[in-house]
Amino acid sequence: MKISKERLKQIINEELAIAEQDSAPAEGDDAALAKTKSEFGNKLLELSKQVRNLQGLDATEMQALLELIIQLTQLASEKTAGPALQRIKQKISQLIGAK
């Protein structure tokens, strides 16, 4: 069975469109979790934009948040950090009273 280049391009484009629809979180859904590195990067980009509008952060708080994000990212890139990150998330939730 021989497939033309045009038909092959069409099939690939259709599959890419389906993949994007499946992986894209609902618009306006801030609770949607990032499942790919691309989505993770997009969430961080959105967060960087939101930080510019935060009120009441002083230099010490900004530096502490930045260092925490850098350390967590380094931890995740160096080894499997899933269990450690889960414990850190639970501890932070306890400290701030979140669920």
Image: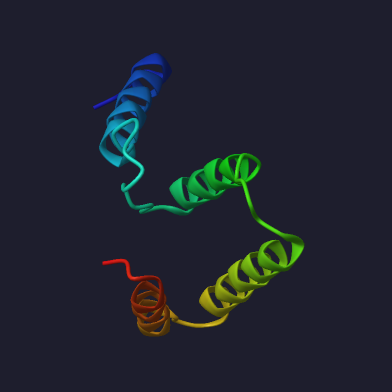
The residue sitting at 40% across, 15% down in the picture is: 6
Q: Quarter-wise, where is residue 90 in the image?
A: bottom left
Image quadrant occupied by the C terminus? bottom left
Which residue occupies the foreground of this view, 7 or 86? 86
The residue sitting at 35% across, 18% down in the picture is: 10
The residue sitting at 47% across, 52% down in the picture is: 40
Vertical placement of residue 17 versus 45, above or below: above
Count the labels in the image: 0
Q: Position of residue 94 (x, y in %)?
A: 34, 78
Image quadrant occupied by the N terminus? top left
Vertical placement of residue 75 versus 98, above or below: below
Vertical placement of residue 6 versus 93, above or below: above
Q: Position of residue 57 (x, y in %)?
A: 65, 56
Position of 80 with respect to 21 (left or right) is: right
Q: Position of residue 97 (x, y in %)?
A: 33, 71
Q: Position of residue 74 (x, y in %)?
A: 61, 75
Q: How is the image coloured?
A: rainbow
**Residue at the top extreme of this rendering:** 6
Which residue occupies the foreground of this view, 94 or 80? 94
Which residue occupies the foreground of this view, 6 or 53? 53
Vertical placement of residue 33 versus 15, above or below: below
